[in-house]
Amino acid sequence: MEKFIAAFSQACAEGTFVKCTLSRASAAAPNGLKNLYLRPVEIKKQFKIAFNYRFATKDEVKNYPPAEAAQLLEELLGKQFLNADLFTTAQDYTLSFDKKGNASVQVKPPAQTEKADVSHDRAKNRLLDPKAPWLHALGITNAKGEVLAHAQDKWRQINKFLEIIGALLREHPLRENAQIADMGSGKGYLTFALYDFLTHHQDLKVRVTGIELRPNLVDFCNETTQKAHFSGLNFVAQDINLYQPERLDMLIALHACDIATDLALSKGILNNAEVVVVAPCCHKQIRKEMHTRNALAPILHNGILEERQAEIVTDGIRALILESRGYHTKVFEFISSEHTAKNVMITATKNERHTSKREQEALAQVAAIKSEFGIGVHYLEKLL
C-alpha cells in the first residue's frame, strides 16, 4: 500500500497522474457508495484532485490538494475499498487486498501516455443531445436546440431520470432486445428520453411501448416517433389493466395517479420484470382506508399531516410488497420539490439473493403496518 500511495504522490508531483479508481466497496463504506473516481483538476490556477463519490442514484464531488488526497487515499484503501487502479503516463498500478487484509501491487505499462485534461469546466458528457428534434416537437427546446425558459424544470427532471436509469443498469443490466413498458406515458417526455438514452447513449437494442388512455396524445407521440425515426418506440391507447405483454423486462410508471401505480406495479411483478421504476402520485386509496390506532392518531387529525402519512404508508407498503416478491428496493427523492411536488421514486431490481425468510419478514411487516393504521387491504395486495 505504501508503494501505491508513493506512486500516486509522485504522479501528482510530476504531472503524470491521469486517474485513479477505487472499487470493491466493503461493508465499512457509506451506504449506497459503489466506487470512487479520482482525476486531476485545475481550480483557480491551483492543482487539485477531484474525488467523485459514485452512489447508486447520485454522484458527489469533493476537491483536495494532492497531499490531502494522498492521506485520504491511505484512510480509504483496505477499509472502505479493497481494490484500486492508478493510471499514470509512466506506469499503471493495481492495488488489491485479500480476505486477510494483505495488500499486493501489480505494475503494468501505461494504458494512456497523454497527459490528463485538468480543466475544471470540461464540457458535460450529456445524456441527451438538446438538439434532438423530438425535444423541439415536445416543446422542451426551440428550433435552435436551446432549452426554453418554461421547460427548464422538465429538462432537469428528464436528465435526473436518465441518471437514475443509468445507475440502475450499471447494477442490473438489461438483457438483449429488452421489452420495456412506460405505463401512463402521457405526452411521452420521459418515454422518448428513455428510448433515446438507451439506444444512443447505452447502445442497447430495446423495444419501448408507451401506454396511455388518451388517443390524442398517443397519435401525437406516434407521429413524433416516426419523425424521429425511433423504430423501436411506439405508443398504444389502452388501459394499463388491459395491457398483456408477451414479455416485460423493465416497467416504468411515472406519476400514474393513485391505484394506477399499483396496477402498473402488479403488471411488472406478475411478468417478472427485472427492473421496476415508479414515481407515485395521488395516494387516495390508503387515506380513505386509514383509521390510525397508534400514538400518531392525535397528530393525524390534521388533514395535511394525515395526507402526508398516507403517502408514506402507501409507498412503504408498496416497497415491502416488492421485497416479498423477490426485489431489492429503494425509495428516495426523485428530484427536488422545488421543481415538482411529485418527487418520490421507488426503484426495484430482481434480487438474486432473495430468500423465503425475507418474503415472510416483508409480509409480516406489511401486516403490522396495516394493523397500526387500521388498513384493511392495500390495493396492490388485492391485484396480486
Image: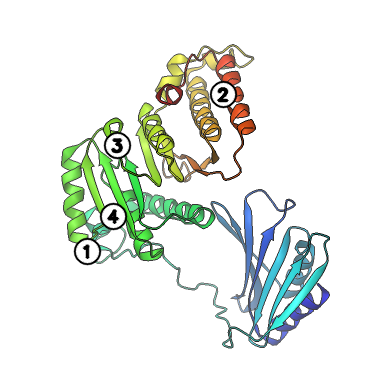
Q: Which mark is residue 244?
A: 3
Q: Is residue 143 left or right of residue 37?
A: left
Q: Amino acid at mark 2?
A: Val
Q: Earlier in the sequence, mark 2 or mark 4?
A: 4
Q: Which residue is mark 4?
A: 140
Q: Which residue is mark 1?
A: 143
Res. 355 in view: yes
Mark 4 lies on a secondary structure that is: loop
Q: Amino acid at mark 1?
A: Ala
Gap in angstroms between the C-alphas marked 1 and 2: 51 Å
Residue at position x 44%, y 68% from top?
Answer: 125
Q: Earlier in the sequence, mark 1 or mark 2?
A: 1
Q: Residues within 10 Å of mark 2 (few under 14, many from 20)?
A: many
Q: Nearer the viewer, mark 3 or mark 2?
A: 3
Q: Amino acid at mark 4?
A: Ile
Mark 1 lies on a secondary structure that is: loop
Residue at position x 28%, y 45% from top?
Answer: 210
Q: Is residue 360 left or right of residue 308?
A: right
Q: How far from the left and from the top, in percent, is residue 247? A: 35, 44
**Contact flag, marks 1 and 2 (Cβ < 8 Å):** no
Gap in angstroms between the C-alphas marked 4 and 1: 10 Å
The residue closer to the viewer here, 25 or 125, is: 25
